[in-house]
Image: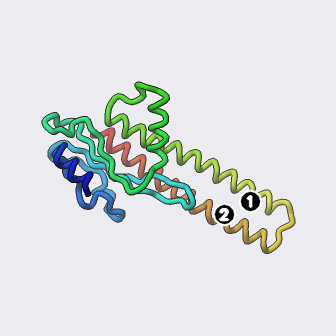
Amino acid sequence: LEEKRWIKQHYGLSIPEDAMDEDIEESARFYEEDNGELHIRSDFLVTDEESRQVRVAFILNQVNEQLRSHGVLFSIHDETVPAFRLLRMRARRMPGLIEDAKEVLLKLFDADAEYCADTLEGIYDDLEAASKKVLDGNVTDEVASEVLGAIARQEDLNGRIRRNVMDTRRAVSFLMRS
């Protein structure tokens, strides 16, 4: 709340109350305000103890030079997102990697896609291990239960990755049109 107040005072930017709503329609997740601000609400994959999507709201003013927010990317999220950490590490290693706020946003989506690809590779490794257990011919009820549980977890994660990639594609498409 204090951060929102400071942003409003310093930048004249009001963060919408519904910025973090999970059940917002797709058509309302990507839009441009009359003053030129782009609003993007996108999901980022997180896989720690459990896999889930984290909603991140972005506000970017690339066109209205009259506002102090011009050229500044604002992100609103409730927890740490691996793609952000990955981009920070890359930016430290490669000065000049990012030239402006729009590029930061595009690189975040790129890092999220890479995180999804790495996670997908892990899924295939886990499924290969499950296949070997089944195909070795010594399938007990305990092994079958273990394999079935592994397949269900990996399929859930696979579905989350697919939804995340579709969401990222929509966000990048909107950003490139704007």
Place of residue 156 in the rendered image (x, y in percent of width and height, measured from the top left): 57, 62
Query: Residue at position x 82%, y 60% from top?
Result: 135
Q: Secondary structure at mark 2?
A: helix
Extreme residue toward the bottom, this view = 141
Q: Quadrant of the C terminus?
A: top left
| 32 and 82: which is toward the camera | 82
Q: Compute the Cα span from label 2 to label 1.
A: 8 Å
Place of residue 66 in the rendered image (x, y in percent of width and height, measured from the top left): 13, 36
Q: Quadrant of the N terminus?
A: bottom left
Q: Is residue 127 left or right of residue 10?
A: right
* Residue at numbered disc 1: 130
Check whether the beta carbons of the residues at disc 2 and disc 1 lie within 8 A of each other: yes
Q: Is residue 3 left or right of residue 85?
A: left
Residue 151's disc number: 2
Quarter occupied by residue 174: top left
Place of residue 100 in the rendered image (x, y in percent of width and height, measured from the top left): 32, 31
Query: Residue at position x 36%, y 34% from top?
Result: 103
